[in-house]
Image (spheres, rainbow, N blue to C red):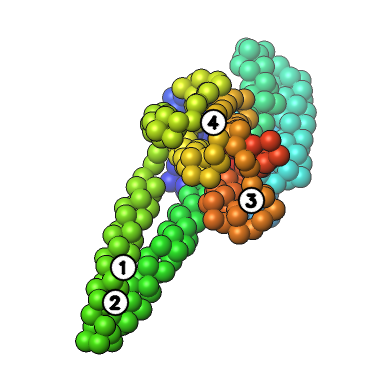
Amino acid sequence: MQKWYHIFPKNTGLSLYVWLVFCVLPFYFIFKSSSNIDLAVGLVMIVLFFIVYRLSFMSSNWFMYVWISIGIILSIYMTLFFGYVYFALFLAYFIGHIQQKPGFISMYVIHLVGTLLAITASFFLKTELLISQLPFIIICLIAVILLPFTIYNRKKQDKLESMLDDANEKISDLLIIEERQRIARDLHDTLGQKLSMIGLKSDLASKIVSTRPEDAKLEMKDIQLTARTALKEVREMVSDMRMIRLEDEIIRIKQLLKAAQIDLEIKGDFKDIHTSLLIENVISMCLKESITNIVNHSQASLCTISFSQSKDEIVMNIHDNGRGFETNNPRMMQSHGLKGMAERIEFMNGTFAIDSEQGTTININIPFAIQQ
């Protein structure tokens, strides 16, 4: 609904000056009347109509229907006695703002039938006056028929776009929460275990340093090695937090597979993949994790990566000719980081499947429309 201080309707496709003309025209028809009584009644009706019209925008529930019904009666009165039909445009515009379908249909039918009957009757009462403005009356009738549906659909579209914006905002918040939880899990799995080990070995070294100094030195070396390992893992985790572009990740995996003496075959042009940075980052992280597993565990000699994109989703398949593994083993899934990949893809409403009968094949499908 518009604010109470808005004088003219907005976004109807008609210029502000056109609405201004429609507001001034009633006075022209009123002053053409012959008697002072008609002049006074006409002026009162004009003022009363605009008051009722404003009250319609300011009201809700059944009060709104009361005011718009009064507006329809005033419009019919002005049409019958003064030959002025253009108040019907204002009413048609307002009816389009009624988003309750039963109320919209009811008021639309009442207004349309009332306007048609009033114009038909006016041709017998004000024949000469209405014939002189016949083209404008036809345009007005077309607007009364089409304008409410135009405004109704536009309001509905605006509402859906607003809901979509709210949903995207909620999805962004959920992604932030999910990323925080992932960081917490990574910190617990990396730093938590390493710091616990450092603490235990420090206690042990302090107890045996006076009686078994050589063993204490070995414990201190283990502490140094554990601390360096923890620092390395933290740096890798921080690197993973940055958005990864698919093109950059392809360059890195080529170097990694070449160093591991594993041949690489890429099917489909990954440069033709056009998607959001968020989806591209998830795909790149899954590709990085998959290639790392191939290098560390598969004993493969060939790795094949295929990309394809439709109007609805992006598909990535990663296959190696290695020894495979037991996909139904939860410990194996956790140790290879596959569970984290599955969680990321599931959060994007995608699908994640593994086939490890002849080598290992990872199938990833991610839709472009992220649903909550």
Residue 282 screen position, x and y as percent: 49, 41
The residue identified by callout 1 is 222
Mark 1 residue element = helix
For marks 2 and 3, the one nearer the N-term is 3
Residue 355 screen position, x and y as percent: 68, 40
Q: Quadrant of residue 246?
A: top left
For marks 3 and 1, the one nearer the N-term is 3
The CA span between labels 2 and 1 is 11 Å
Q: Is residue 320 above or below residue 348?
A: above
Contact, mark 2 vs mark 3 (Cβ under 8 Å): no
* Residue sitting nearer the eye, 307 or 32: 307
Residue located at (75% from left, 39% from top):
105
Residue 36 screen position, x and y as percent: 55, 34
Residue 101 seen in the figure: yes
Count of number-bearing discs: 4
For marks 4 and 3, the one nearer the N-term is 3
Mark 4 residue element = loop
Q: Is residue 213 above or below residue 101?
A: below
The residue identified by callout 3 is 64
* Residue sitting nearer the eye, 169 or 274: 274
The residue identified by callout 4 is 301
Disc nearest the viewer among 3 and 1: 1
The CA span between labels 4 and 3 is 75 Å
Q: Is residue 64 left or right of residue 227?
A: right
Disc nearest the viewer among 2 and 1: 2
The residue identified by callout 2 is 215
Residue 253 seen in the figure: no
